[in-house]
Amino acid sequence: MVLGTRLRRLLVLPLVAVLLPVGSCGRNHPEADAFVRVDQVGYAPGEQKIAVLMAPRDAAGARATVIDASGDKVLNATIGARRDGWNDRFPDVRPVDLSALTQPGTYRIRVEGGVRAESVPFRVGNSLFDPLVRDAVGYFQAHRDGADQISGPFQRQPAHLADRAATIYETPDFDDDGTLTGELTVSGGPVDVEGGWYDAGDFLKFTHTTAYALIAMLVVQRDGMAVDGLAAETRHGLDWLTKMWNPQAGVLYTQVGIGSGLSGSFLGDHDTWRLPQADDQLDVQPGDDQYFQRYRPVFRAAASGEPLSPNLAGRVAAAFALAAQVQTGTDRALATRYLTIAAQVYDAASTDGDTLVTAEPRSFYPEDSWADDMALGATELALAGAGLGDPRAAEWLRTAVSWASGYLEDGGTETLSVYDVSVLADAELARIPGAAGLALIPGADAELARIPGAGADALRADLERRLEAGVKAAAGNPMSAAAGNGGSDYAARQLGFTAAAELYQHTFHDDRYAAFATAQRGVVLGANGWGTSLVVGAGTTYPRCPHDQIASLAGTSARMTGAVVNGPNDADRVHELLDDPEPSPCATGSLAAFDRDDAHYVDDTRVSATNEPSIDFTATGLLAFALISRLTATSPGTPGS
């Protein structure tokens, strides 16, 4: 599988110099020559707590102590054996075990003897991750499109109201680099596609990523975690996703807007840097270069009545079926409506294995798997159908078992991401025997027993195989990172491993992967080679200059709190963007001392490869942080909890 290449073109940035303060990258006492990397948000009292010492020379014999907010020593921490080096400057990397630190409070780690370092502050306590879940919801609120805006720090205004009567175009042609090779051709409309969320730092809207984000958010909502604004936000996303399905024509719309324009003909979304409401002020006619920025094209997954790409059909059905589960106890009529849409979309799926549809161009999201989407869609339909007493629930369960059996036999090792939802399909299907209302599904246990490889136990084994692959990868990494040292969708892949381990613990009441989950989360929240959190607003050091137009141009000092950015990426890709001759509108101090030959990170608005947030990144984070909150709330003093 190709993971998240996200071949977006660099947006044209304005020539304004708004340099924000440099975040601290481990502010050490004056003699410090080493660095301690730590989860900057903190740890639950009972969690395993492993920080990482990066030293410029042999650190054997160094001593680590934990000091509290008053500067008093409270713990002698254990510095472990040397791991592989980080880079030429920091050849000595060692774990620092703080697990004996269980008293709530704010702390730092101080290293002396041979090398000297002091960490940024971190906390020990319960409910540390609740704010991150709320912040993630705030990110979605700040990235709403359409008329329905929320008053907030970015002073958002209605935008893209022309989407209420948008024109449908034939699927365009692109070359292997994702470059448009021909003019757009009208094929229908008008259609109302106003609303929804912007996909990332641009203003495109995709069914593919919106459905994934909704699945993550609705799982949190269904399972009872109270998060301010979450219910209203999922409703906003569902309202738009509903518009993207035309049941009369049997058409699923996949996208609003086009990324890059046709050279010499028109400009696309990525070709100018502006606030979204600016598009509504454009006075343009057909043929004008900015015409498609105001009057944005809509594309279809397939022609009217033709079968749908199974990855799209499965995940869109899953989102609506989860929405039905959420509404069953409060608004049965709405739940029934959502279930109807879910069944319609699911029934329209093609399973002939042709090239999957995600976005235009497909290189934005080159997904290759779809049995996982179909399994998840059928599972959520069965759960929703059982709750509503729909007689089709048994057939949906049989279908879910069939598709799950297919991807189980493939032996995949991918973790949760926008490209693969097998982890969620495993966990959701495994919950069926204990889910309320499933007495309405005749023979549910017998049906699950049909899964090859010990029936329902095969679902657990599949999750374990995926997690063991991550554990093995982490064991060979100096920072214990399962996703390596960088790359496309880096932070999201780390959070995918975190969520997978937490789903395993929730589903099977087994905490064998709890320490692994804590380590993967820590990499995202500062325990990485660069010492920066990859979630805006989380911890002491985090991205100040995201590649996000709203964050950059809203004219406010507010930060895009809650946004999960890509994180360190391929060095060549980063430098390709840094070679842009235009000055950066926002950049913090250099982190080059921590770069590796294979991976670089820069906090620079120009560099989408490291600093662009997205709804799928942030939704994976929302799910992971919500699961952490549930675990630490239910068993705050249990080791590994």
Image (cartoon, rainbow, N blue to C red):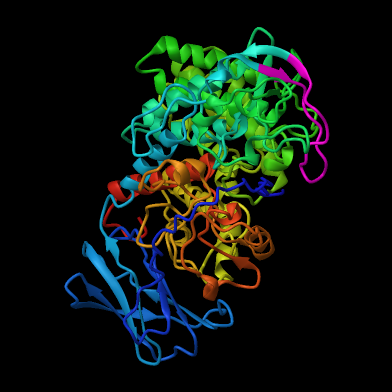
- Picture quadrant of residue 366: top right
Residue 389, can we see it? no
Q: Is residue 538 above or below residue 399?
A: below
Residue 403 falls in which quadrant of the image?
Answer: top right
Most foreground residue, 24 or 110: 24
**Closer to us: 198 or 419:** 198
Q: Residue at x 81, y 32 (%)?
A: 173
Is residue 45 depicted above or below 317 in this figure? Answer: below
For the question of whether residue 210 can be seen, the reply is: yes
Q: Position of residue 186 (x, y in %)?
A: 76, 17
**Image coordinates for residue 614, horizontal then vertical, percent:** 53, 43
The outermost residue toward the top is: 248
In the shown orientation, is residue 231 left or right of residue 10? left
Q: Is residue 290 above or below residue 31?
A: above
Q: Image point 60% across, 14% down: which residue?
A: 165
Q: How many marks?
A: 0
Identified at 67% across, 49% down, the residue is 3
Query: How far across and how far down the image is residue 306, in percent?
Result: 77, 17
* Residue found at x 58% / y 48%: 13
Does residue 173 appear left or right of residue 594 in this picture? right
Q: Is residue 185 magenta?
A: yes
Q: Is 599 drawn above or below residue 455 in the view shown? A: below
- 240 and 550: which is toward the camera: 550
Q: Is residue 430 left or right of residue 46?
A: right
* Magenta stretch, residue numbers: 167-187
Query: Residue 640: x, y in percent?
Result: 37, 59
Main SS category, magenta section: loop
Q: Quadrant of the C terminus?
A: bottom left
Is 410 one of the magenta-colored residues? no
